[in-house]
Image: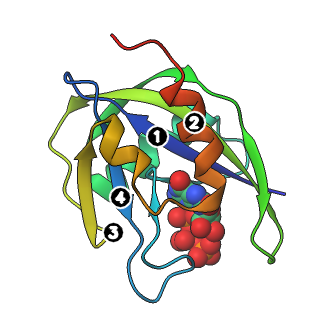
């Protein structure tokens, strides 16, 4: 099982940052929540901070963990661990995605999201709006 952390980055308008996987990668063209594989001995929150620095050039503060999702795309199972977070420094620039987009609830519902991310988005959409 490979543990992967994914950040639900919320802005002040209640939107989430969605990122599109680039051509040539597994799940190219699918949208996801940015993050990546957790290294041995690393906590999910620490992995999230490290990955979002690398991928987007931002520093985040992890907040609430959501329910992890185990999924197999046919090449071994991943455990996707979602954590909501806020940006405390920097503006996101895509270093590893071909598009990034702040999405409101309607836009999120219409995204061609990676399969493992769908229950995560459903859980987040079920939270009361601020
Ligand atoms: N970062 C991230 N990965 C996700 C999400 N949803 C999802 O299924 N994944 C899958 O989790 C795995 C780890 O992703 P990654 O971004 O760290 O790794 P990668 O694409 O460089 O590695 P890979 O191509 O060897 O799998 C990938 O297979 C990716 O497709 C998500 O929301 N965020």
Secondary structure state at the residue bearing disc 1:
strand
| Residue 68 makes an appearance in the image | yes
Q: Earlier in the sequence, mark 1 or mark 3?
A: 1
Secondary structure state at the residue bearing disc 4:
strand
Instruction: Give the residue drawn at x 70%, y 30%.
Output: 67
Instruction: Give the residue drawn at x 28%, y 73%.
Output: 98
Residue identified by numbered label 3? 97
Q: Residues within 10 Å of mark 1 (few under 14, many from 20)?
A: many
Label ID, residue 122: 2
Secondary structure state at the residue bearing disc 3:
loop
- Disc 1 and disc 3 in contact, CB within 8 angstroms: no
Q: For ligand 1, which image quadrant applies? A: bottom right
Q: CA distance from mark 1 to mark 2?
A: 15 Å
Q: CA distance from mark 1 to mark 3?
A: 14 Å
Q: Is mark 4 within 8 Å of ligand 1?
A: yes
Instruction: Give the residue drawn at x 34%, y 69%.
Output: 96
Residue identified by numbered label 4? 19
Label ID, residue 7: 1
Against 121, is 101 above or below?
Answer: below
Q: Nearer the viewer, residue 1 or 50?
A: 1
Q: What is the x, y in percent for residue 120?
A: 60, 39
Q: CA distance from mark 3 to mark 4?
A: 6 Å
Q: What is the x, y in percent for residue 24?
A: 46, 89
Secondary structure state at the residue bearing disc 2:
helix
Q: Nearer the viewer, residue 53 or 13?
A: 13
Q: What is the x, y in percent for residue 83?
A: 54, 31
Q: Quadrant of residue 9?
A: top left
Label ID, residue 64: none
Q: Residues within 10 Å of mark 3 (few under 14, many from 20)?
A: many
- Disc 3 and disc 4 in contact, CB within 8 angstroms: yes
Q: Earlier in the sequence, mark 2 or mark 4?
A: 4
Give the side of residue 33 with respect to residue 36, left or right.
Answer: left
């Amino acid at each position: 099982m490979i543990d992967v952390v994914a950040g639900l980055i919320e802005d002040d308008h209640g939107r989430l940052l969605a990122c599109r996987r680039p051509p040539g990668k597994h799940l190219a063209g699918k949208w996801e929540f940015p993050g990546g594989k957790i290294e041995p001995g690393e906590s999910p929150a620490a992995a999230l901070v490290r990955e979002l620095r690398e991928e987007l050039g931002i520093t985040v503060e992890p907040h609430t963990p959501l329910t992890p999702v185990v999924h197999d795309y046919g090449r071994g199972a991943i455990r996707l661990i979602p954590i909501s977070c806020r940006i405390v420094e920097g503006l996101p620039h895509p270093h590893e995605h071909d598009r990034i987009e702040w999405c409101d609830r309607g836009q999120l519902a219409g995204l061609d999201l990676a399969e493992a991310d769908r229950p995560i988005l459903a859980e987040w959409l079920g939270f009361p709006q601020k």
